[in-house]
Image: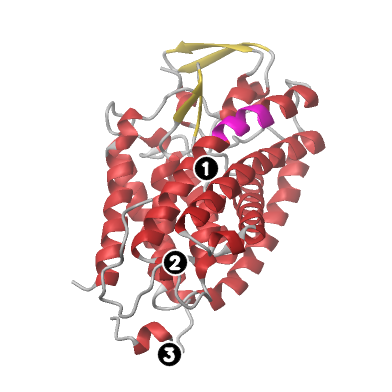
Amino acid sequence: MNRRRGFLLGFLVVALLVAGGLSYVASSSPDGLDTVALHGCQVTGTGSGEQLDGTCIAQNAGEHATAHSPLAGYSVLGGEGTVGIAGVVGVLVTLALAGGLFWLLRRRTPTRSAERGDD
Amino acid sequence: MVTMVTAMHMSDGLVNAPTSLVFGAVAVVGLVLCLVRARADLDERTAPMAGLVTAFVFAVQMINFPILPGASGHLLGGALVAILVGPWVGTVCIAIVLLVQALLFADGGLTALGTNITNMALIGVFTGYGVALLLRRFARRSRGGLVATAFVAAFVNTVVASLGFVLEYAIGGSGGASLGTVFVLMVGLHALIGIGEGVITAATVGAVAAVRPDLVYLLRGTATPLVRKSAPSTPTTGGAA
């Protein structure tokens, strides 16, 4: 395996490990923006979601248009403990989309790397 | 179980429809410009790298780290992509991450895509790149300089991107909190998140520069980027940053 492929493969493995493994220990507290959006509200978890008492920005948030996506909320069909699987799927989908787009957009003229004999 | 915890970006309805539309237009115009300019930075060598950087940002954005009791933060990635693949390609990277998150993972509203892309892709990437450019001479001198530049650029991109939301809320916020409160909380929290963003960005850029400095956009044009590479197959010296 040449160096270039080795590096790219290593990069992919790191991304898959982060999304597929490290995601299990990620903090479940609201992020910066959500903390601001929830400021002023008391959040109570209910069976169907959450109840916001008080006055806060998040009360204006509508239900997400893709809330019923099989991967909604970084889970597979809402299953417990599936965040890693959702993450791996996300990494591969993102790689396919971005890699495909950038590959199509690339300049086709000979470059230094082509002269260098990389694949 | 609170369903909101996994939502990381602006939901629908936080700003009114005209504001969403305006920033949707800003995002489209900005992205088209970036796509046009990105071509010059993409070839057989950099296109796969850009794809992987995008996937990496998606992965790392999933990792919320605690900043205060009951509050977390996650990478935005502006400076990270700007330093590794340049601002034009980098903006497209972040936009693709936001698109995948909104469409597949119900993270970030569809009508909020314009504001989210404006804040995290356009503002975040170009702020990070601007800071990195200001510090470029320093960054090109040593790997330590590059890592420090990455940290500072990432910190600034986080805080400035958070100001994007404050601006949108000022223009067409749907209410629930005063503008002053939103400003103070957004900047305060994102200054803390910016430290985490800085650490992740510095570590990532440092690691890439340790093995493939030729793939670091900010180092382009230097004859021998950081470490001398007489032949492509020669292992580079030095460990990870």
Amino acid, disc 1: Gly
Q: Is residue B190 magenta?
A: yes
Q: Is residue A36 toward the left or the right of residue B71 in the image?
A: right
**Could you tell me how far apart the alpha carbons at marks 1 and 3 are, in whole angstroms?**
36 Å
As drawn, the label of residue A9 is none
Residue indicated by mark 3: A110
SS class, disc 3:
loop
Residue indicated by mark 1: B198
Mark 1 and mark 2 lie on one chain; the one further toward the N terminus is 1
Q: Residue at x 61, y 20 (%)?
A: A38
Q: Is residue B96 visible?
A: no
What crowding class fits label 2: few (fewer than 14 Cα within 10 Å), some (14-19), or many (20 or more)?
many
**Could you tell me how far apart the alpha carbons at marks 1 and 2 are, in whole angstroms?**
21 Å
Q: Is residue B10 above or below residue B113?
A: above
Q: Is residue A13 above or below residue B216?
A: above
Amino acid, disc 3: Pro
Measuring from the top left, give residue B24's x and y in whole percent. Answer: 68, 51
Furthest residue toward left: A1
SS class, disc 2:
loop
Chain designation of label 3: A
Measuring from the top left, give residue A8's x and y in whole percent. Answer: 31, 63
Chain designation of label 2: B
Measuring from the top left, give residue B13's x and y in whole percent. Answer: 66, 33
Residue indicated by mark 2: B226
Chain designation of label 1: B
- Whether labels 2 and 3 belong to a single chain: the reply is no
Span of residues in magenta: B186-193
Q: Is residue B222 magenta?
A: no
Q: Is residue B67 toward the left or the right of residue A5 in the image?
A: right
